[in-house]
Image (tube, helix red, strand yellow):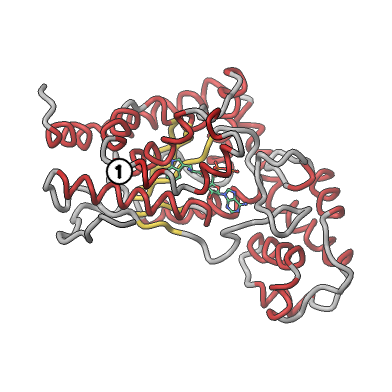
Amino acid sequence: MDQVARQDVPYEGPERVLSGMQATGNLHLGNYLGALKRFVPLADEFETLYCIVDLHAITEWQEPRTLAANTRAVAAAYIAAGLDPERSIIFNQSQVPAHAELAWILSCVARIGWMNRMTQFKDKAGKDREKASLGLYNYPVLMAADILAYKATRVPVGEDQKQHLELARDIAQKFMNDYDVPGFFPLPEPLIGEQAARVMSLRDGTRKMSKSDASDMTRINLSDSDEDIAQKLKKARTDPEPVPSAAEELGRRPEAANLLAIHAALGDETIEAVMARHGGETFSAFKEAMTARAISVLAPIRERMKDLLADVPALDATLGEGAERARAIAAPTLAEAKRIVGFVG
Ligand code: ADP
Ligand code: TRP
């Protein structure tokens, strides 16, 4: 964004990974392939923090009991997908006050003009923008605080979060310019997957698969039964032609491209490899292969989630321990930011 000069002093702190997911409704295949699945291998290489962003969730109305259940469901999904709470710090954002405190400071750094360009706000607020919560407008600043409170350098997210990451970099840069503290914050890099960075609706290949879509048939949820998965894939929209066999076809066949991309990402292979094997088949044959693969990946996650959710005290203890570790990392950064701003005490 404009007005922000490039950082002249490099950041010299350690590499650290942070990401978050909202505690709103069921996680779906887009969340899994675009973000969650990619969290797991990063834990082998970096210090990792993964939060459940409950403060972000209430930017749109959440029934209190549902919010608590959804927070635990996302925590269970993190662990069921392969994150180890001993190695990765797993916590819910509201247990770490530094997020909200730093967000206030950063909201005085961010400019209204920057916020007005955020496309996710425009999408979520819809036509009647005056009725959106102030929190929804400020959402990207809180996200910047999530990242910068830990001086995270890398942020694995889906494609739709790229603009928010750019804003986080601009906020970090402006803070360092305004207060003359070069190198205080890193400029966090988005880690966007080459595959499945944007999983599309099963009913419309031009729309993102989303929790907020009114029709459940548009998405596969991590909690779906094998029968649900089979049914949704069977009913997934395609076109009258056979399964594509060449990359040139994908641009004009969004639904086919989406199914190929999902199948490839679920099996850690390229779309080209999938086309080489299945190109020219009927979609009904291809959907059978897809169903088998989707179930083999998702059923163990679903079952593990069920087990984890059956022991709420243990899950809550995991979140509590994660929050304690997170608070210890964020505290010195927040204290330093407050000192830089000129707060006494
Ligand atoms: P949603 O966008 O469904 O409301 P979140 O905002 O909590 O869910 O997103 C959690 C993560 O999942 C983010 O990194 C986001 O980029 C990613 N994500 C969400 N939907 C998709 C999708 N359809 N394809 C790929 N990644 C996605
Ligand atoms: N805004 C993200 C989303 O909608 C969720 C999120 C909140 C996040 N804080 C974050 C992602 C910090 C990465 C890092 O998906």
Is 87 positioned to the left or the right of 8 in the image? right
Is 80 positioned to the left or the right of 287 in the image? left
Which x, y percent locates residue 200? 68, 56
In this rendering, the answer to whether 129 lies above or below 292 is above
In which quadrant will I find the C terminus?
Answer: top left
Which x, y percent locates residue 239? 85, 66
Crowd class of label 1 (few under 14; some 14 to 19; many from 20; radius 10 Å): many
Which x, y percent locates residue 11? 20, 56
Amino acid type assigned to the residue bearing label 1 in the image: Leu
In this rendering, the answer to whether 316 lies above or below 161 is above
In which quadrant will I find the N terminus?
Answer: bottom left
In this rendering, the answer to whether 84 lies above or below 62 is below
Tell me where residue 6 sits by quadrant.
Answer: bottom left
Residue sitting at 30 percent across and 51 percent down?
Answer: 170
Q: Nearer the viewer, residue 297 or 255?
A: 255
Q: Nearer the viewer, residue 225 or 214?
A: 214
In this rendering, the answer to whether 22 lies above or below 182 is above
- Which element carries disc 1, helix, strand or loop? helix
State how many labels appear.
1
Residue sitting at 68 percent across and 61 percent down?
Answer: 262
Residue sitting at 75 percent across and 48 percent down?
Answer: 218
Tell me where residue 254 sits by quadrant.
Answer: bottom right
Which x, y percent locates residue 219? 73, 47
Q: Nearer the viewer, residue 264 or 340?
A: 340
Residue sitting at 71 percent across and 63 percent down?
Answer: 258
Q: Which residue is mark 1?
A: 148
Q: Is residue 200 visible?
A: yes
Is 140 positioned to the left or the right of 336 in the image? right
